[in-house]
Image (cartoon, rainbow, N blue to C red):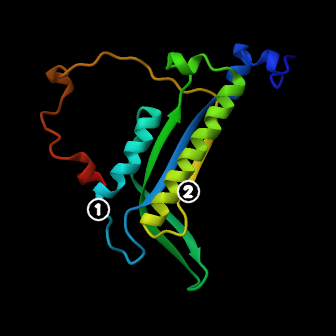
């Protein structure tokens, strides 16, 4: 059995894989606490920061967060959105070189980065809190395809997706 906590083993592939990779999710409200919808453009700076650090993200436009409102003794729910990203060490040649100790450090830095974004957004949107979920996952992989402008007609419906999807969805 290899002890991956020893510095001498930090470059072993088995130890790098033992550290795994990371998946982060941030959930933001779609309205303020009085029920007024937040402008979709207000989320852009947070998504941009995440994309600049991680290379991309996925926004899930509909979440429903519910909790027990102790003051009113009732279930309270609000609509939100989830921004997800991940740390993939294997798809980036520079990150792939990191040993297990450096990978663990990088994921902790990423978690601090995401928490800072959540703190800033909580202040901007008047929230008691904005969660960051950090899942340490075994592996994530960007699987290469072949970019094409169009697919063959039999794969398409004939309907166009028009307009700004961000504004429509968020």
Q: Residue at x 33, y 58 (%)?
A: 42
Whole-percent x and y of residue 67?
56, 70
User: In the structure shown, which secondary structural element does the residue marked by tag 2 occupy?
Assistant: loop
Residue 154 left/right relative to 93: left
Residue 3 left/right relative to 45: right
Q: Residue at x 75, y 19 (%)?
A: 10
Looking at the picture, tell me which residue is in the foreground, 80 or 121: 121
Residue 155 left/right relative to 67: left
Residue 16 left/right relative to 28: right
Residue 64 visible in the displayed image: no
Q: Pointer 2: what residue? A: 131
Q: Are marks 1 and 2 in contact (CB under 8 Å)?
A: no
- Residue 2's image quarter? top right
Residue 156 visible in the displayed image: yes
Looking at the picture, tell me which residue is in the foreground, 156 or 26: 26
How many other residues sit within 10 Å of disc 1, few (<14), some (14-19) or many (≥20)? few
Q: Pointer 1: what residue? A: 39
User: In the structure shown, which secondary structural element does the residue marked by tag 1 occupy?
Assistant: loop
Whole-percent x and y of residue 44?
33, 50
Placement of 32 over or under 5, stated as above or below: below
Identify the disc placed on residue 81. Answer: none
Looking at the picture, tell me which residue is in the foreground, 155 or 163: 163
Figure quadrant of the C terminus: bottom left
Q: Which residue is drawn at 62% across and 35% down?
A: 107
| Real-space Cα separation, disc 1 to disc 2, in angstroms | 20 Å
Q: Which residue is drawn at 28% across and 55% down?
A: 41
Whole-percent x and y of residue 139?
59, 26
Q: Earlier in the sequence, mark 1 or mark 2?
A: 1
Residue at the outermost bottom position: 72
Whole-percent x and y of residue 30?
37, 63
Placement of 42 over or under 2, stated as above or below: below
């Amino acid at each position: 059995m290899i002890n991956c906590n020893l510095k001498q083993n930090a470059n072993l592939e088995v130890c790098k894989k033992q550290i795994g990779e990371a998946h982060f999710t941030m959930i933001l409200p779609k309205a303020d606490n009085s029920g007024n919808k937040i402008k979709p453009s207000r989320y852009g700076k947070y998504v941009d920061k995440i994309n600049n650090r991680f290379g991309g993200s996925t926004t899930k436009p509909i979440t429903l967060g519910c909790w027990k409102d102790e003051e009113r003794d009732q279930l309270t729910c609000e609509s939100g959105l989830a921004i997800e990203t991940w740390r993939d060490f294997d798809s980036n040649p520079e990150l792939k070189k990191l040993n297990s100790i450096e990978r663990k450090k990088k994921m902790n830095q990423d978690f601090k980065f995401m928490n800072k974004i959540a703190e800033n957004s909580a202040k901007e949107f008047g929230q008691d809190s904005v969660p960051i979920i950090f899942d340490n996952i075994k592996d994530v992989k960007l699987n290469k395809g072949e970019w094409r402008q169009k697919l063959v007609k039999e794969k398409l419906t004939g309907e166009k997706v028009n307009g700004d999807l961000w504004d429509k969805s968020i």
